[in-house]
Amino acid sequence: MVTSNENQAHIDSLRIRMQRVEKQSSTICAAKWLQSTIYLHNGQTHSCHHPAVHSINAEVIIKDPSALHNTAVKLKARKDMWRGKQTKECEYCWNIENLKKDHISDRMYKSADERWSYPFLEEIEKADYSKNVIPRYLEVAFENTCNFKCAYCTPDTSSKWMEEVREHGHYPTSWGTGNLDWIKRVGKMPIPRTATNPYVEAFWKWWPELLPELRVFRITGGEPLLSQHTWRVIEDITKGEARDLDFALNSNLNVPDKLFERLLSETPALTEKLRNFEIYTSCEAAGKQAEYIRYGMDYEVFFKNVERFLKETPSRTRINFMITFNALSLTTFLGFLHKVLQLRKQYNENPAFNRLPIMIAYLHWPPFLSMRILPRNIREKYAADFRAFALAYAGAFDEKNGTGALYLEEKDQLERLADFMLEDLPEKGVKRDRKDFAKFIEEYDRRKNLSFVETFPEYADFYRACKIL
Ligand code: SF4
């Protein structure tokens, strides 16, 4: 666990590294050169996650597959940064830095990262803004094939969502949730998995050059375990030499048994060849409520698989829980956290190595599923419960209840969540979002033969009130 002294030392050392990063200019961000997310299923990319995605030129990648990452848009942003300009697409960071309050922006965290950016600054210097570079942190999605259609997902990311919208049309919210015309217009329409995909072809052409250079590689989706490309990556890594690579897979951990068994059986040999192997999974509620939010999930099977992975794979593997905290998470969230802490008690043999980290993010989109549409009294009640939970479990193994500890940075995340829950939305926006919430839920129930009121009886009055707005 990190003490405040260690934390201060960490920040001091980060600031020292930043002096080297900013040798050329004070707006350089290493992520623009060395980090990339590439959506191969629709030919879009960004560096890092904060700027909007843009389209890759399908002609250029035929000759030069590294243009999957080194697009004209990124080269232009690099040029701005090289010349000390706050490039437009990175507003997220400038908003923090322009406060002039000594806050540490993501630009600094990412540029000073000792794993995948700071050791490679010379490559940025050699390339300046005119030459292509190989990313050291790469995330790819091969396809949108997925067996889930979570409430907060979209057709371009889930094939199940796509099937549903093709059959029933988009949702009748003011945003037209799932509108395929919009998806087409912004270039996000996925290329079907059976069709020729020039982006996937370019990736495999680039792969032999890419693999030895990568330090972090992550596959997202869709559900990556449903993609043959994921298994090809696993096979290539397992057959090759040992690498200084952190490899991660996103997974809903609710894939057909055969595929899950394959993951279990291939993980030991795969892990041997890697520095780290991790799964990133998602959940933000417990039981039936979790299954309602993440449609397609079987909560019991999910945790059975989590436990099998921890038990049957080497003790240096990890399962990270990504929490997209939303309006439907409040009432059973602590039940979910409690379950994670119980598993920690059993599987965190070395408390310095947390095999089950949690990361709490708040859902911003779609706005009608944000927790902030809920009445203040509900948010206040749960914010108080979350604070009490954070205090009770931080750093403490609870022998009586058989749970492991909440790590300090997780306590901080939970307290931040409690703070954020109490920030009200502007009245006009709330009304629109609550109306949308009612329209979405009514249609969601109808299409999936669910009952919101039976699954969330504690929200029945709120739902009724939203319906008559
Ligand atoms: S400056 Fe900020 S938004 Fe831009 S790439 Fe770097 S971390 Fe991302």
Image (spheres, helix red, strand yellow):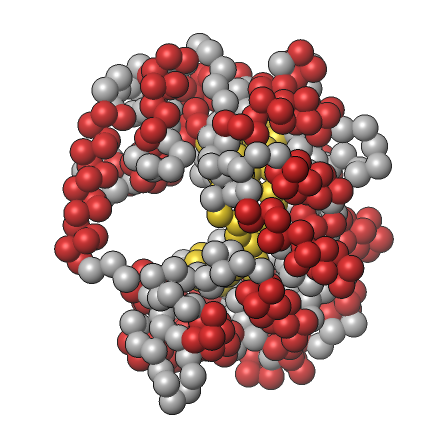
Which of the 4 image quadrants contains residue 197? Answer: top right
The count of marks equals 0
Q: Residue at x 54, y 71 (%)?
A: 285
Residue drawn 45% across the image and 16% down it: 76
- Relative side of 444 to 427, left or right: right
Front residue (pair 413, 241): 241
Q: Can you tell which quarter of the image residue 419 is in?
A: bottom left
In the rendered image, residue 441, in percent from the top left (x then y), is placed at: 66, 67
- Horizontal placement of 352 versus 41: left or right? left
- Horizontal side of 367 relative to 417 (left or right) equals right
Q: Which is nearer the eye, 253 or 435? A: 253
> If the image is split into quadrants, where does the C terminus sit?
bottom right
Residue 133: where, in percent of width, then height? 48, 19
274 vs 231, nearest the viewer: 274
Residue 313 in the image, given as x and y percentages of width and height = 58, 60
Residue nearest the observer in this picture, 425 or 145: 145
Quadrant in which residue 290 is drawn: bottom right
Q: Residue at x 47, y 75 (%)?
A: 346
Q: Is residue 382 visible?
A: no
Residue 278 appears in the rendering: yes
Taking the spot 56% from the left edge, 54% from the top edge, the residue there is 279
Q: Quadrant of the N terminus?
A: bottom left
- Relative to residue 7, is residue 348 depicted above or below? below
Residue 314 percent coordinates (x, y):
54, 58
